[in-house]
Amino acid sequence: MNTTTKTQREFHLKSRPEGVPGKDNFELVEAEMPEPGTNQFLVQNEWLSVDPYMRGRMREGESYAEPFQIGEPMEGGCVGKVIQSNNDEFREGDYVLGNQGWREFWVSDGQGVQRIDPELDGVEIQNHLSVLGLTGMTAYVGLLEIGKLNEGETVFVSAASGAVGSIVCQIAKVKNCRVIGSAGSSMKIEWLKDVAGIDEAFNYHDTNDVSAKLKELCPDGIDVYFDNVGGDHLKGAIDNMNQNGRIVCCGAISGYNDKQPRPGPNNLFKIIGKRLRVEGFIVRDHYDLQEKFVKDMGGWIRAGKIIWEETVTQGLNNTPEAFIKLFNGDKMGKALVKV
Ligand code: NDP
């Protein structure tokens, strides 16, 4: 904190990206230090989350989250410490989970903010932005609630070594499923097989025919496809789905930086013959499952059944670089920034 001048630093959206975002789309601004008013508290951020959905908010127009405005602060998940409080519920020293990332300090009256326990066994505070936060819950809700996974089924997961995908893979293994993952480097493939313990994994850069690769790795077909990627992964999965299979549409990162929407898969008619259910979901519509998620995930973590990776970028000023790495795959697991 710059106590003499009473300013804090925050990132603003400077311009809307065309294609893959660059550092020049963001501006680090010295802003006035926020002062907590009646019933408010001041938080100093310690950890920030960068997530693919933020790319959607950088463009104008319809999306499931409001677009960021040029010249206004960026937002995102964050964990910080209450350092000053006029609020009875959130006291000085409390750790909280909020949505005012991309900055050093923020004030709140507590709406939409959760207190977190910094002393949970085996869990560090930043894990509330990854395995125990919305990321882990996306995997849990998508696979179990939307995908209606049954024990012993065959599951294909794209972006399988990423924040959500790596947890999906391991929940599916907890459910005794056969799990196949795709990812973008040999190091990630090794991690998926040797550390996360999935059955088969392939580097999608090594094939120009995802459908043929899936046919080879899933000779008995796929029951649930957890789609983080869209595009040729979705087409390949549809080709290999079993009757009454489920496709969980979580994300479609392969198209997030397209300047023009690309044509859809040309095999959608197979959805009919195979009686597939294809369902999109947004994790925040499922907060009713949060308690169950925390209980199940906590149990799996304590039992050593779920492990996770975090790629930590140091320093608020490097937040745009951490974000851009989501699109070139230069990270493992959950991407976080240590302020
Ligand atoms: P990740 O940690 O998985 O990061 C993104 C990864 O996507 C990269 O590491 C990269 O890994 C891969 N990737 C990037 N570009 C491409 C491409 N063109 N083709 C294939 N893979 C690519 O992010 P998250 O786990 O946070 O999110 C995963 C997906 O889930 C995203 O699509 C996101 O939008 C979605 N999501 C949806 C939510 C919901 O409520 N529906 C909530 C949270 C996330 P690699 O090296 O393997 O290429």
Image (cartoon, rainbow, N blue to C red):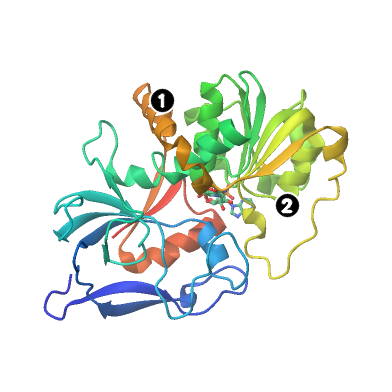
Please tell me in which quadrant of the rendered image residue 273 appears.
Answer: top right
Which of marks 1 and 2 precedes in the sequence? 2
Dot label at residue 231: 2
Image quarter of residue 279:
top right
Horizontal side, residue 84 vs residue 55: left or right: left
The residue positioned 61% from the left and 74% from the top of the image is: 18
* Kind of residue indicated by mark 2: Gly
Q: Position of residue 117 (x, y in %)?
A: 24, 40
Q: Point out residue 6 in the picture as x, y percentages from the top left corner.
A: 17, 77
- The image shows residue 181, relative to residue 84, as above or below, that is above
What distance separates the C-alpha of mark 2 from that of mark 1? 32 Å
Frontmost residue, 26 versus 88:
88
Q: Residues within 10 Å of mark 2 (few under 14, many from 20)?
A: some
Give whichever of 36, 244 is nearer the camera: 36
Asked whether mark 2 lies closer than 8 Å to ligand 1, one says: yes
Determine which residue is flagged by label 1.
300
